[in-house]
Amino acid sequence: AEHDGVPCVGPDHLPHDGRCLVWSSRAVPAGAGIDPEPANLWVGDALAGVLLAPEHPRPDAAWLADPAPFPELPDRRVEGTWLSRAWDLVARGPDQLARDLSASTALPPGEGVPAGAWKLGSGPVRVAPSARVEPGVLFDVREGGIEIGPEVEVRTGTRLAGPLYAGPGSRLLGGAISGFAGGPMSYVRGEVEQVTMLGYANKAHDGFLGHAYVGRWVNLGALTTNSDLKNNYGSVRVGPPGEEVDTGLYKLGCLIGDHAKTGIGVLLNTGTIVGAGSNLFGAELPPKWIAPFSWGRGAALEVYRRDAFLATAAKVVARRGVEASDALSAWLGDAWDAARGTS
């Protein structure tokens, strides 16, 4: 089941027939697969998940909030690592993407370069039969493979550099796009480097986006641009004023939450965190820490009214063929209440 294009996570949505794997989204397995025998699965010294047989009870909401080993199951170690900070997704994304693409069996192996397109390097190119790649597209696979999913459109004038993955229904509309993973239904144009888009995001115009992580239903207005390198080439710090943390990274652009939006020409500083549901506009540089559901220009940010946010979100999802249901409004309203209910 999906909600707002996102797979539901909860006890009511776990399968009750067949085997069931419940896995932490912060655990990154190193291998291509997991032994199919039921077990408590550990990465390092932390529980990463459980693999359950049909006869095992499914975890309830309390377990999902605070996982613990199933006493009747054996313990098994899985090689892998943990994501501890949000910016790990930016720093480690391309290398993990390259490994995933190398092991991918989602599309048949083969050269895959459509007629009229060009290829640099010996890495794999996989293009789904239903994808539409116009003549003049360049596939650069010297640093990693490229996979173009079903119903993806790649227009003339696009230079793709691997590792790169474009999920179902996405549109790559032109420009230099490298180290990118996005979809489903992500629209991308301009200079894009080492960026992950979780889906239904829109960057359909020119502007630089680099070393960034972009949530679902984000819309970046024309010429929105972020910095991903400080002028003094120092490591990037992130967080609210007085509580900033040194990431140890020299390249880190922005982390943008679900349903955030920027107007034309918005500039984002190195290491900017844009809270979910925010709406930014104007030429003034906003602060590097933007609370969820903020609205305004530059540093003059107010609370984005609940009714206005929900009305806009309903229009946005309808444009991509997702029903603006009462359940969706209630879900997004709960998120607003949790973040801004006392504002």
Image (cartoon, rainbow, N blue to C red):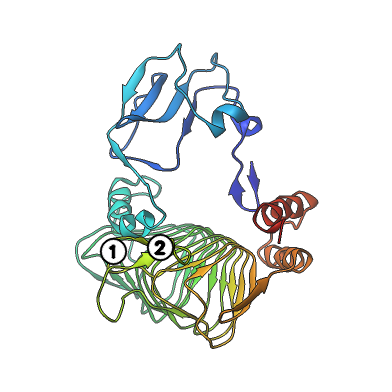
Residue 36, horizontal then vertical, whole percent: 38, 23
SS for dot 1 = loop
Q: Residue at x 27, y 34 (%)?
A: 79
Residue 33, horizontal then vertical, whole percent: 34, 34
Q: Nearer the viewer, residue 159 or 59?
A: 59
- Amino acid type of the residue tagged 2 in the rendering: Glu
Residue to which mark 2 is pinned: 244
Residue to which mark 1 is pinned: 249
- Which residue reaches farthest front? 242
Is residue 322 visible from the viewing direction of this image?
no
Q: Quadrant of residue 80?
A: top left
Q: Nearer the viewer, residue 312 or 297?
A: 297
Q: Residue at x 73, y 55 (%)?
A: 333
Q: Residue at x 33, y 68 (%)?
A: 236
How far apart marks 1 and 2 lie (CA) works out to 14 Å
- Amino acid type of the residue tagged 1 in the rendering: Leu
Q: Quadrant of residue 143?
A: bottom left
Task: Judge whether 328 appears above or below 36 on screen.
Answer: below
Residue 217, horizontal then vertical, whole percent: 60, 63
Task: Judge whether 290 appears above or below 266 on screen.
Answer: above
Task: Judge whether 33 appears above or below 40 on screen.
Answer: below
Residue density around tag 2, few if under 14, some if 14–19, many if 20 or more, within 10 Å? few
Which mark is first along the chain, 2 or 1?
Answer: 2
Q: Is residue 98 left or right of residue 305?
A: left
The mark closer to the camera, 1 or 2, is 2
Q: Is residue 125 left or right of residue 134?
A: left
Q: Residue at x 53, y 58 (%)?
A: 184
Task: Judge whether 302 appears above or below 267 on screen.
Answer: above
